[in-house]
Image (cartoon, rainbow, N blue to C red):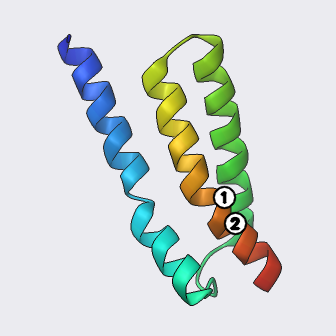
């Protein structure tokens, strides 16, 4: 594996996994008081676009990182929108 690919996969892993603690906390406590709903709407829309882009250019690292991050961020957004 080339260094650039290794760096890409490492960066994708770290940024994706960084959402796990927040997702776990929100899902277990249902507390979204300190989270900006607008920020999460914009973020999730951005993730969807990055996912589409990664699929279009056939880049597995971009596609998978954004798919997994979307799976972690979407429950937070849904809980935020339901609870305010």
Mark 2 crowdedness (10 Å alpha carbons): few <14, some 14-19, many ≥20 = many
Q: Is residue 32 left or right of residue 42?
A: left
The reply to whether discs 2 and 1 touch (Cβ–Cβ < 8 Å) is: yes
Q: Secondary structure at mark 2?
A: helix
Q: Is residue 56 above or below residue 17?
A: above
The residue at the far front in this view is: 28
**Image vertical order of residue 74 relative to residue 1, above or below:** below
Give the x, y percent position of residue 75: 65, 65
Can residue 84 be seen here? no
Q: Give the percent coordinates (x, y) of residue 4.
A: 25, 16
Query: Which residue corresponds to the image point at 58% horizontal and 84% vertical from the top-left?
Result: 34
Image quadrant for the C terminus?
A: bottom right
Which quadrant holds the N terminus? top left
SS at badge 1: helix
Quarter of image, res 80: bottom right
> Residue placed at 61% from the left, 76% from the top?
35
Q: Is residue 56 above or below residue 13?
A: above
Q: What residue appears at the point 49 percent right and 16 percent down from the top-left corner?
A: 59
Mark drawn on residue 74? 1
| Number of dots carrying numbers | 2
- Closer to the camera in the image, 44 or 36: 44
**Residue 68 in sight here:** yes
Residue at 63 percent of width and 68 percent of height: 76
Q: Which numbered dot is residue 77?
A: 2
Q: CA distance from mark 2 to mark 1?
A: 5 Å
Disc 1: CA contacts within 10 A as few (<14), some (14-19) or many (>=20): some
Residue 6, image quadrant: top left
Place of residue 39 in the rendered image (x, y in percent of width and height, measured from the top left): 67, 62
Can you tell which mark lies on residue 31? none
């Amino acid at each position: 594996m080339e260094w650039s690919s290794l760096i890409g996969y490492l960066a994708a892993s770290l940024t994706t996994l960084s959402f796990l603690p927040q997702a776990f906390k929100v899902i277990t406590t249902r507390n979204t008081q300190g989270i900006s709903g607008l920020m999460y709407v914009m973020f999730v829309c951005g993730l969807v676009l990055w996912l589409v882009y990664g699929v279009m250019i056939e880049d597995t690292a971009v596609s998978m990182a954004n798919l997994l991050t979307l799976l972690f961020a979407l429950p937070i957004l849904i809980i935020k929108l339901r609870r305010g």
